[in-house]
Image: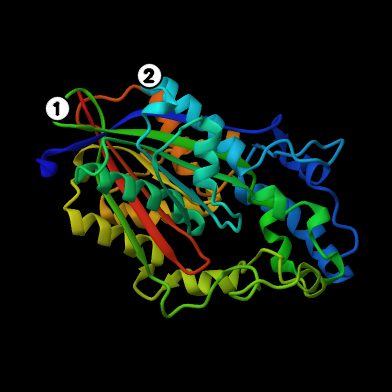
């Protein structure tokens, strides 16, 4: 019966483009901002060392050749490279894939990335989905794949996420005289990468890591958007977009963002996490790893202080961000890949993950448990 199907993670993979780039060399790869208003340039010089300390990211990865200024990868090629590693671990050829579920921050290609990935993997026919929902997109792709396998529609799924944030952060992308502080804030946060999982349905229990719960919600119905561009919901002339700076990716920072992230009864993040735990009755007694998909050690540490009230110990925090940078949505799968390849899981170990994105405070999470 469909209700008896469990969903096992049988493969995982990651891909990071280019050589590691230390924080102090970000501008060498992304290019110097030199034509922004003088007030913004002074702010950038002042805030850079503060961001270095707050983020605590030792190195980043970018799909840009720092000499030629050309891109070396795109979202599809990075996703395919992560997918091949996941398929290798699962010992399945690409032809076995029944469903591709792809999530990315935002996308405007036609045809959609999921079918481009299908083509590059040489899969003649399969089901596919493309989801764009900022940092929740990877979680939503996982949620759909989890449910579609559990209900018996598909036997397996390749779940992927990739992000080439550098394409919106390099100096050549901006109409520099129109740059505001919010437009360049993310240059110190984001980088490029991809992650993938291969999921399979199981009718009988066997050792391995199983998805027990997936969750999503939007908590921003009465909050302003704190991240995004200014494009309307229709196509504009690229020249008009550039001339008005509508394409710039902006994020609120400091007091503005804090005001909307912190409610009187707690942060949006922890309240959403509590709702997920309560909705599924998740038992934290066996929590081994808590993977917080947030872009800064400083923010993660603040959130962990509040999470202690839920029974989540500080030493359960798992992140590989310091060595990889923060590529956004795929970070969730990249951390899982790191756990599966580098850590030894024991029977009953619980992996819990949750994310809040700030374009409209969409939230998502998952729980996985290891069966010995």
Q: Is residue 342 visible?
A: no
Residue 243 vs residue 311, the one in the foreground: 243
Which image quarter holds the C terminus?
A: top left
Measured as percent of width and height from the top left, residue 82 is found at 52, 31
Left or right side of 170 for 351: left
**Location of residue 318 with respect to 30 vertically, above or below:** above
Residue placed under numbered mark 2 in the picture: 91
Left or right side of 107 for 336: left
Label whose residue precedes the other's in the sequence (2 or 1): 2
Residue sitting at 79 percent across and 41 percent down? 29
Q: CA distance from mark 2 to mark 1?
A: 19 Å
Residue placed under numbered mark 1 in the picture: 205
Name, please, the residue furthest toward the front.
124
**Location of residue 211 with respect to 137 vertically, above or below:** above
**Location of residue 174 with respect to 265 vertically, above or below:** above
Which image quarter holds the N terminus?
A: top left
Q: Residues within 10 Å of mark 2 (few under 14, many from 20)?
A: few
Left or right side of 370 for 39: right
Residue sitting at 28 percent across and 44 percent down? 146
Q: Label 1: state its secondary structure.
A: loop
């Amino acid at each position: 019966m469909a209700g008896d199907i469990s969903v096992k993670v049988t493969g995982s993979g990651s891909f990071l483009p280019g050589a590691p780039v230390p924080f102090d060399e970000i501008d060498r790869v992304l290019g110097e901002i030199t034509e922004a208003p003088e007030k913004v340039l002074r702010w950038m010089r002042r805030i850079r060392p503060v961001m270095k300390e707050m983020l605590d990211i030792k190195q980043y990865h970018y799909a840009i050749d720092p000499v030629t200024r050309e891109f070396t990868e795109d979202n599809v090629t990075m996703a395919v490279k992560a997918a091949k590693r996941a398929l290798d671990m699962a010992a399945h050829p690409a032809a076995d894939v029944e469903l591709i579920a792809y999530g990315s921050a935002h996308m405007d290609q036609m045809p959609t990335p999921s079918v481009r990935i299908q083509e590059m993997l040489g899969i003649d026919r399969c089901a596919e989905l493309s989801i764009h929902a900022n940092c929740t997109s990877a979680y939503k792709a996982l949620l759909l794949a989890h449910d579609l396998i559990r209900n018996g529609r598909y036997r397996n799924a390749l779940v992927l996420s990739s992000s080439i944030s550098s394409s919106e952060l390099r100096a050549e992308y901006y109409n520099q005289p129109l740059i505001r502080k919010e437009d360049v804030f993310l240059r110190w946060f984001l980088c490029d990468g991809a992650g993938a999982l291969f999921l399979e349905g199981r009718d009988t229990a066997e050792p391995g890591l199983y998805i027990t719960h997936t969750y999503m919600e939007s908590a921003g119905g009465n909050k302003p958007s704190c991240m995004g561009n200014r494009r309307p919901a229709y196509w504009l002339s690229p020249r008009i977009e550039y001339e008005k700076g509508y394409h710039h990716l902006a994020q609120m920072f400091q007091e503005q963002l804090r005001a909307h992230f912190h409610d009187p009864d707690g942060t949006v993040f922890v309240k959403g996490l509590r709702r997920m735990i309560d909705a599924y009755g998740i038992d934290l007694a066996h929590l081994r790893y808590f993977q917080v998909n947030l872009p800064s050690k400083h923010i993660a540490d603040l959130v962990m202080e509040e999470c202690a009230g839920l029974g989540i110990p500080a030493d359960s925090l798992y992140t590989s961000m310091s060595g990889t940078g923060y590529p956004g949505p795929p970070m969730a799968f990249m951390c899982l890949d790191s756990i599966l390849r580098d850590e030894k899981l024991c029977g009953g170990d619980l992996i819990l993950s949750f994310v809040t994105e700030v374009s409209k405070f969409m939230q998502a999470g998952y729980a996985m448990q290891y069966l010995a």
